[in-house]
Amino acid sequence: MNVMMQNWVAIGSLNDIPRRGARCVKNGGMTIAVFRTADDKIYALEDKCPHRNGPLSQGIVHDGCVTCPLHNWVISLETGKAQGADEGEAAMFPVRLDGDTVMLAIGMS
Amino acid sequence: MTRQKLVVIGNGMAPGRMLEHLFETAPDAYDVTIFNAEPRVNYDRIMLSPVLSGEKTFEDIVIHGDGWYVDHGVMLYKGHKIVGIDREAKTVLSEHGEVAAYDKLVIATGSAPFIIPVPGKDLPGVLTYRDLDDVDAMLLAAQSRGSAVVIGGGLLGLEAAAGLKEQGMDVTVIHLMPSLMERQLDPAAGYLLKRELESRGIKVVTKANTKQIVGDRRVEGVELEDGTVIPASLVVMAVGIRPNAALAQEAGLAVNRGIVVSDGMQTSDPDIYAVGECVEVDGKVYGLVAPLYQMADVAAGHLSGDSAKRFVDTSTATRLKVTGIDLYSAGDFAEGDDREEIVLRDANAGVYRRLVLKDNRIIGAVLYGDAADGPWFFDMLKKEMDVSGMRDTLIFGQAYQGGEPLDPTAAVAALPDDAEICGCNGICKGKIVNAITSKGLTSLDDVRAHTKASNSCGTCTGLVEQLMTLTLGDSYNPAAVQPMCKCTDLGHDDVRRLIRAKGLKSIPEVMQELEWKTSCGCAKCRPALNYYLVCDWPDEYADDYQSRFINERVHANIQKDGTYSVVPRMWGGVTSSAELRAIADVVDKFDIPTVKVTGGQRIDMLGIRKEDLPAVWADLGKAGFVSGQAYAKGLRTVKTCVGSDWCRFGTQDSTGLGIRIEKFMWGSWTPAKVKMAVSGCPRNCAEATCKDVGIICVDSGFEIHFAGAAGLDIKGTDVLGMVKTEDEALEHIVALVQMYREQGRYLERIYKWAKRIGHDEVRRQIMDDADKRKAYFGRFVFSQTFAQVDPWSERVSGKDKHEFRPMATLSLEAAE
Ligand code: SRM
Ligand SMILES: Cc1cc2nc3c(=O)[nH]c(=O)nc-3n(C[C@H](O)[C@H](O)[C@H](O)COP(=O)(O)OP(=O)(O)OC[C@H]3O[C@@H](n4cnc5c(N)ncnc54)[C@H](O)[C@@H]3O)c2cc1C
Ligand code: SF4
Ligand code: FES
């Protein structure tokens, strides 16, 4: 079994992220992209496309997905998985809203 | 287990398919090295004709892109011809001196076009039709719009003739035999074909023997045996092919007409196999892909240890790939005492059908005009089915069997599961239906990707679509307009029309009113809608940055490592010491790794971190630079030459005019990028004749060109017309671009839009109709009052701050 301790941190307010857009959170050497959909759901993925590491935060957000800016892979925000015929997965991070505050969980093993 | 070394000579369609099979069944058996005399990857040679006619680009017909070789660890030597095989040492030698050792060798050198040995055959301008270089050479020759003679009225010759005609040449086909394609068609069908070609303006001379090709330093014409001379600036010889077997012969392998192989594709040396057009099996050589693909399968089997596979000769059906000509031929249709024939003619509909029967079995079929039943007849031919039961109605086709005429889908429905649909790839009905249902395929492209059906010559596309309709029901409608994307059934033109008609002014409004099927669109439709709204309501619509591709959202070009490049405008390509100094300072200050002169006469700074962009722009802005919009579906560059200011040939101030146009039009958004150029004289140093819009200055004024391109497609421009003054030139160009802005589909460049609506229509509206022109001009000028805002200075003063800064910076990782 893999026990993960989750460490919730406030990273800003919902309105810092444009609707159908994303913002980045730097965590040491890693960048995490926090997405906000048209209906104000939020998701967090590592900012690294499973194809060739494209910055997903720079893509177009539509429905529950983001289209990578480099070669148009479509990544599900809900599962981190590439859609359609492509295969691969971006790492996911738990996020939630506490009122208007966006809380991100950074796992520490 | 150590891998064996497999060397392949030739990278054509046969070995390409062989390797696909091999990597499927025994991915780890061999280290593969390929030598290919052609300097390119494996492509669909069959589809060269659509490339010649302009219906496809080379990219469309690539079978294995560079990535495929990397993924499979294949070493591909492009442009390396093998000149020797040393069977003792088991090595091959390339003309560049490369030596490669093999455990198993596959020879797949294909065949070479036959050159008729007449005087003049070596003159420049005499070509054959075999590979992409031939097509490129023909396209180049076609730019002169001169006359072409195609020698040979077979499949290849006629495809070449149709393509050259499509490219605007005056084409004559000369054919030795009394009727065209005599190997595949009987004289009656040959006649119908000739009539059809003639009605398209292609001249056809049959029973014509070429005596010599005339010309002084390059070809000027073709002289026939009877003394007639047909003038031509291009001659294409398409009279047949010869297997490339010399290499094998020199290596001491058994060679007859082709390289002699067993039905297991083995040559006389057990470690050497051969596949493709270069081989001879059981006394026969082949020139169509279906049997070659069977060879590929057999050879792959033997190489991976399955020596049970055997090549069996089967007949192949032929179709001519000329858009709008429907003909099908299969089997043997010579007359004979033991044969009967059934013929159907419908002169009005231009339909001709002939079946040749022997012992109540179909042995040959020729269909012209309506070839839909071809596969059905061919299926019975291959199965040697006894047709006496339906002898009377047989010729009417499958739909008439069983009394009631059926619709075409029902005809396909009636085909057995093992009926072959795609002849090139040997794909049967069951396999396609199965893939559609089990994989949930909904588009033709999906079916092509998963089954390979309709992926080679494409003539079975209609059948595959019928199968899709059959399997998917009404949800598949191939005749309908291509929808913008999966979010709507409407095509681009309908969406544009409805946006105006219904006065829709925001993306959610469009999606609501036009019944979008997804909640907020996708990465295909959103940027398109955003453009349509920007274009139609320049004063009212608020640009939706979240619907723009990243480059347009942050006004810089994203690079593969996530950094950006910055290209400031250098009006007309002219710069100064102050500008260059400012660039140099920015490069030093921000430690910019690469500075490059672009193909668009300006300077690109590459590798800038996103966070640094606003500061970089601030410094550039101080020196007077604005964004070069090198990222935009909008006006990019206006290239110029030095013109009358300096050049001894310059007729007008091309530099000044270029700068004036760029300053007038910068900032405008367009369906796809727009590039322009102004050359000071017809020497055309600014390359104006391959731009979306170009100007060639002449003594008497300005020749305006349009609809060129030099990217994925290379297309010379057409002339829009001549005007006398700079003011007129500007007005015409601006009007043309506005017309395109209003009508173009998103991502459709000017040359594609103009092709779709017709070059004459563009000329009529812009050159001949002054009112229309002035109205377009006026609308462009209005729209520019909202568009000409430098996006860089806007962002330097704080717009979209969030784009350039992280939302938070955490340091939660355990300290190291
Ligand atoms: C920088 C430059 C290459 C260079 O170092 O010279 C360049 C770089 C890129 N070109 Fe280009 N093209 C550049 C001149 C050209 C030219 C030559 C010209 O403009 O005279 C062509 C052929 C002319 C033409 O367009 O017909 C050209 C045909 C293309 C195409 C093919 C377009 C087409 O419709 O066929 C693409 C792909 C596309 O746009 O979809 C492309 C796309 C690209 C992109 C934007 C690739 C991308 O999507 O990221 C490259 C961006 C790199 C960057 O960040 O700077 N580039 N590209 C040139 C910039 C010119 C400028 O100053 O703005
Ligand atoms: C314009 C055109 C249209 C066609 N249309 C059809 C059609 O509709 N239907 C159909 O079934 N068939 C069609 N064909 C025929 C079909 O393309 C060929 O049968 C098939 O491509 C042959 O495949 P191959 O692998 O044997 O040889 P090729 O595809 O010819 O490949 C041979 C390769 O080997 C290379 N080579 C030769 N010698 C050497 C050497 N010494 N060292 C290294 N490399 C070497 C050559 O450069 C070449 O790239 C068409 C052909 C053409 C040219
Ligand atoms: S040709 Fe253009 S698109 Fe291709 S790599 Fe070069 S710059 Fe990029
Ligand atoms: S890196 Fe994301 S699609 Fe290629």
Image (tube, helix red, strand yellow):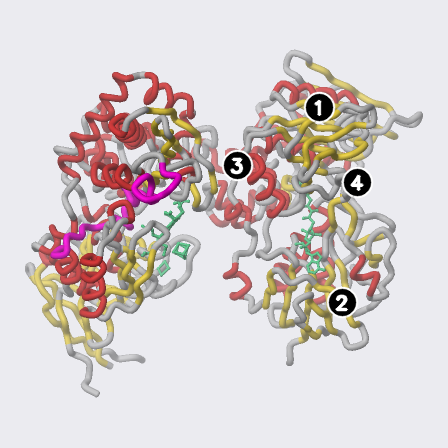
Residue B545 position within the rendered picture, expressed as x and y whole percent measured from the top left = 19, 47
Tell me if residue B48 is in the magenta stretch: no
Residue A74 position within the rendered picture, expressed as x and y whole percent measured from the top left = 34, 54
What number is the disc on residue B54?
Answer: 3
Residue type at tag 2: Gly
**Residues indicated by labels 4 and 1 sit on the same polypeptide chain:** yes
* Spatial separation of the CA atoms under disc 2 and disc 4: 27 Å
Residue type at tag 4: Ile
What kind of element bears circle 1? strand
Residue at point 14%, 55% (across, down): B621
Q: Is residue B597 left or right of residue B690?
A: left
What number is the disc on residue B84?
Answer: 2
| Pointer 3 or 2: first along the chain | 3
Residue type at tag 3: Gly
Q: Are marks 4 and 1 in contact (CB under 8 Å)?
A: no
Q: Is residue B381 above or below residue B447?
A: above
| Chain to which the residue tagged by mark 3 belongs | B
| Pointer 2 or 1: first along the chain | 2
Neighbours of disc 1 within 10 Å: few (<14), some (14-19), many (20+): many
| Chain to which the residue tagged by mark 4 belongs | B
| Chain to which the residue tagged by mark 1 belongs | B
| Pointer 4 or 1: first along the chain | 4
Q: Are marks 3 and 4 in contact (CB under 8 Å)?
A: no
Residue at point 42%, 57% (across, down): A86
Q: Which is closer to the viewer, label 2 or label 4? A: 4
Mark 3 close to ligand 1, CB under 8 Å? no
Q: Where is residue B206, by image quadrant?
A: top right
What kind of element bears circle 2? strand
**What secondary structure is the stretch in magenta mostly built from?**
loop
Residue designated by label 4 = B116
